[in-house]
Amino acid sequence: MDDWIDRLQADTAAQRVGATHLVDAWLAQTTVRELIDVSGVVEAVALSASERNIAVVIERLVDPAWDRHRARAEAEGDRLGDYVPDAQREALLDAIAALEQPRAQWAKELIDTDMLRELLAPALQLVLTSFTKKLPLTGKPLGGLAGGLAGKLSAGSSRLQRSKIGSVGRSVIGNVEERFAQAATEFSRSAVAVLREGIAERLASEEGAALLSAMRRDAATKMLEVEVSVLMAEVDHVVPRDQLAKVIPAITEHASRRDFIKESTRSELTAMLGSIGDTPLLVLLKESGAEEAIRKWLNALATDALGAALADAAFTTWLRDVSRA
C-alpha cells in the first residue's frame, strides 16, 4: 500500500501531472468568495500596515525599484509618448485640451490673500515703476489715464525747461517721479485682487477658454516628447524622498487604523464579492485572457509544493497513515 507513495516521491513527472490536476480542480471549483475572507483581509491590512513594515517596504523595495527604473529609463531613452499608441495620440491630446477648469471651491481659503499679496506686490511694483519711468514727457501722448498724466508732465517739463529756475524744475520732476513710484507701490498692494479677478474673467470668456485649451494641447504635445528619465530626475530634485520616508510609514499606520478606512475596505470588498463573488476563478482567468500564464505559474508552484511535501517526513507519515486507514 505504501509503494505508490515511494514511487510518487521518486517520479517528478508524476508529481507534475498530479500538481496540474490539483490546479485544474482548484480553479474550476473555487469561487472568488471562497478565496477572499473580508474580515480577514481588513484585519490583515490593519496589522500589516505598521510603521515598521511600511518603512521596510520603502527602504528595501520602493526606493531601490525607483532607482533601478530610473537607470533603465536613462539607458533606454524612452519618452512619455512612447507609451501612447500612435492611433490614440490625437484622442489623448483632444481629451487633455477638453479638460474643464477645476471649480476648486475647497481651495478658496487654501492660499492666504495677505501672503499672496506680499509675494506678488514687489513684482507688480517693479513692473509699474518701470512703466512710469518710461512715460514720455514729450512726443505723442498716451491714451487714457497714462496719456493725461504724460501730457501734463510734458507741458510742465517744457515750461520748466524754458524757465530760468531749472534747478527747481528738476526738483519738481524728481518729486513727480517719487510720487509715481509711491503710487506704483500703493497700487501694487491692492493689485493682486484685481489681477486675480481679471485672470478669472479672462479664463471664463469664450476666447480665453479657447486659448487655454490650445495651450493645454500644446503643452501635452511637448510633454509627450520629454524623456521619462528626465521627469524622474525632476521628481528626485523636487521631492524630498528622505524626509517623506520618515513620515509616510507613520501616516500609513495611523490611517489604516481608522474606522473609516476599515469600513471603506470592508464595504468595497463586499461590493466586489456581490458582483463577482460566485464566479469560479477559472472563468475569471478565461475572461481576462491570462489563463495560460496564470496556469503555468500555478502549476510550477503546485509542483514545487507537492515535491516539498513528499520530501517532508511528517507529511509522508501522515499520508501513509491515511492510506492504511
Image: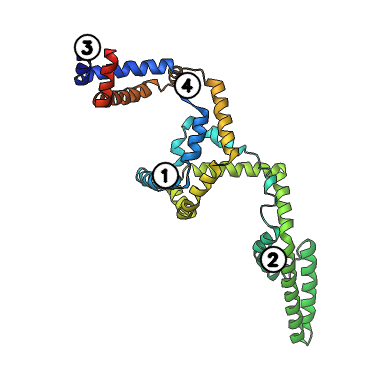
Give the x, y percent position of residue 81.
Answer: 46, 39
Q: Mark 4 or mark 2: which comes first in sequence?
A: 4
**Label 2: few (<14), some (14–19) or many (≥20) C-alpha neighbours in 10 Å:** some
Report which residue position mark 1 lands on: 57
Quarter placement of the C terminus: top left
| Residue type, label 3 | Met
Camera-nearest label, 4 or 2: 4
| Residue type, label 1 | Val
Report which residue position mark 4 lands on: 34
Give the x, y percent position of residue 155.
Answer: 80, 74
Spatial separation of the CA atoms under disc 1 and disc 4: 29 Å
Camera-nearest label, 2 or 1: 1
Q: Quadrant of residue 175?
A: bottom right
Spatial separation of the CA atoms under disc 4 and disc 2: 72 Å
Q: Mark 3 or mark 2: which comes first in sequence?
A: 3
Spatial separation of the CA atoms under disc 3 and disc 1: 49 Å
